[in-house]
Amino acid sequence: GEEVAQTPKHLVRGEGQKAKLYCAPIKGHSYVFWYQQVLKNEFKFLISFQNENVFDETGMPKERFSAKCLPNSPCSLEIQATKLEDSAVYFCASSPWTGRTGELFFGEGSRLTVL
Amino acid sequence: RKEVEQDPGPFNVPEGATVAFNCTYSNSASQSFFWYRQDCRKEPKLLMSVYSSGNEDGRFTAQLNRASQYISLLIRDSKLSDSATYLCVVTALKGGTSYGKLTFGQGTILTVHP
């Protein structure tokens, strides 16, 4: 597709429930990034993929968060046993190449609310 | 200390005003610098890249001072449609090279009023 597609747009979960978010990057883009934006505009990097391989996972809270990018499937970000502080907008972004480019193409985000 | 720091504002200016935003970054090895714009509850979009020589795009001028690790954005003749959050963004490094991962400042809120 010509844009990054994220689903669902909104997700509500009770504490302790699982949440799974999906992202279809722009066709031909080999890099996928997940960011978490909480209140006050703080963007936190979670993880990046180069095709289906994890490229950088330094931002992932590994105990409860996991992510995948499998061939011919949307990428996914899964949160096991959600906590209140997981409430945020999760943005997926894709990029066609590495190097100096800074233009990541963002999806519209998935807003997760944990009650 | 945060890797990228901005004055969060908010900046409230009248139409036609000139407004400047500043940003500092802590990693002297950072290679690429950008301003992104985020409208309320929407995804961030690239506004412009920032080059060492300074660059201009219409009413927007960006400057980079590597020695001071300082980036600026100047908006001239502000329009109502410029109201948004402006994010200072720096590429992070992995293994000494830039690969496209972005580090965001906390954003500066701009409101342009009639």
Image: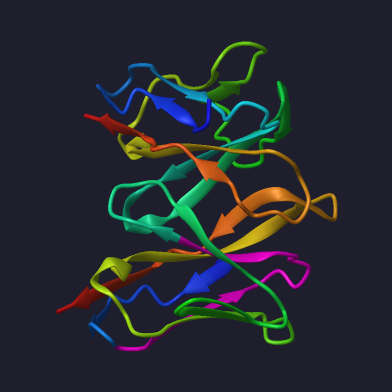
Image quadrant containing the C terminus of chain B: bottom left
Q: Which contiguous range is marked in magenta?
A: B17-36
Say how the picture is coloured.
rainbow
Q: Residue furthest front?
A: B58
Quarter holding residue A102: bottom right
Q: Residue furthest right?
A: B96
Instruction: Report whether A1 appears left or right of B111.
Output: right
Image quadrant containing the N terminus of chain B: bottom right
Q: Position of residue A44 (x, y in %)?
A: 51, 48
B38 to A115, vertically: above or below: below
Instruction: Report whether A83 appears left or right of A96.
Output: left
Q: Residue at x 72, y 83 (%)?
A: B53
- Near-viewer residue (A81 or A54): A54
- Near-viewer residue (A44 or B49): B49
Q: Position of residue A60 (x, y in %)?
A: 58, 35
B52 to A33, vertically: above or below: below
Q: Residue at x 34, y 23 (%)?
A: A8
A50 to A76, vertically: above or below: below
Q: Residue at x 42, y 66 (%)?
A: B86
Q: Position of residue A108 (x, y in %)?
A: 39, 38
Quarter holding residue A50: top right
Q: How many marks?
A: 0
Q: Is residue B69 magenta?
A: no
Q: Residue furthest left?
A: B114
Q: Residue at x 37, y 25 (%)?
A: A82
